[in-house]
């Protein structure tokens, strides 16, 4: 079983829509969580950290539920530039980051 | 402040050959990690180097090896290439005081194709 599992999508939404997706993690030793964004054939870039209390960064809201080992990302008022693959990432402080396979989001005009 | 640079950007090799990929870490970063990303998958951890020593290793065979140099740059070597080694190889650097997973800077990767 993979440490981080994600709904692969794709999520195809119109501009201005809200899109939400989630991931689950199996390693209960995971301490920190992140969402990374990866554009086609490019390197992953940090989108935001995820805190247990939930946190927002502009149009992006992330939630962490440690009891259910579940992480979510919500994008409000989608822009064309939000089209990308979103990678859910766990860090168990064991030298590595554990990446999910990614959720693909396509925002159409 | 320069970011992480990787070379070459693309590479085609024949099964059984050996390959060396290179990474220059971001200024001030002393830790380098290597990841393999197959098509449609997330990056998978290969190993990490700190102070020129392997600091942790993922589930990859010994034919995957690495080096870190005093200037913190790094190499990834793969021997006896297999078709399944075809992937995007990503180098990520981090430094003292980096905020764990939020403190990684990834290079743009080397796309390796094994034929």
Image (cartoon, coloured by chain):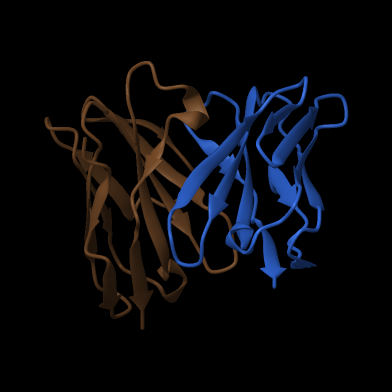
Q: Where is residue B16 shown, x and y percent of the image?
A: 29, 74
Residue B59 shows in this picture: no
> In which quarter of the view is residue B19 placed?
bottom left
- Closer to the camera, B95 or A48? A48
Q: Quadrant of the C terminus of chain A?
A: bottom right
User: Residue B39 location in percent, x, y?
Assistant: 53, 69
B54 and A89: which one is in front? Answer: A89
Left or right of B85, for residue B15: left
From what the image shows, is residue B39 above or below residue B66?
Answer: below
In the displayed structure, would residue B70 be above or below residue B74? above
Left or right relative to B13: residue B47: right
Q: Residue furthest left?
A: B70
Question: Which residue lies at the image location 22% right of the left edge and 64% below the top edge?
Answer: B8
Q: Tell which residue pokes out farthest to the bottom in this image.
A: B115
Asked whether the viewer can see residue B70, the reply is yes
Chain depicted in blue: A
Residue at 50% x, 30% y is B102
Point 19% across, 33% down: residue: B72
Whether residue B103 is situated above or below residue A81 in the rendered picture = above
Q: Quadrant of residue A15?
A: bottom right
| Residue A9 sits in quarter | bottom right
| Chain painted in brown in the figure | B
Residue B89, percent from left and from top: 38, 58
């Amino acid at each position: 079983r993979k440490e981080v599992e994600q709904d692969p999508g794709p999520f195809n939404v119109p501009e201005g829509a809200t899109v939400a997706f989630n991931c689950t993690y199996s390693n209960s030793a995971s301490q920190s969580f992140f969402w990374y964004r990866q554009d086609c054939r490019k390197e992953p870039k940090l989108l935001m950290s995820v805190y247990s209390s939930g946190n927002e960064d502009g149009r992006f809201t992330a939630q962490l539920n440690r009891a259910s080992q579940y992480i979510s990302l919500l994008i409000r008022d989608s822009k064309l530039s939000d089209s990308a693959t979103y990678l859910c990432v766990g860090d168990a402080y064991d030298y590595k980051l554990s990446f999910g396979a990614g959720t693909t989001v396509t925002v159409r005009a | 402040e320069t970011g992480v640079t990787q070379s070459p950007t693309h590479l085609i090799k024949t099964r059984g050959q050996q390959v060396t990929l290179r990474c220059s870490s971001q200024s001030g970063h002393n830790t380098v990690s290597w990841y393999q990303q197959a098509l449609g998958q997330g990056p998978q951890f290969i190993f990490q180097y700190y102070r020129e020593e392997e600091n942790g290793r993922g589930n990859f065979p010994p034919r995957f090896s690495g080096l870190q140099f005093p200037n913190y740059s790094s190499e990834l070597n793969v021997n006896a290439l297999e078709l399944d080694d075809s992937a995007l190889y990503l180098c990520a650097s981090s430094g003292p005081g980096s905020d764990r997973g939020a403190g990684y800077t990834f290079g743009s990767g080397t796309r390796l194709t094994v034929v």
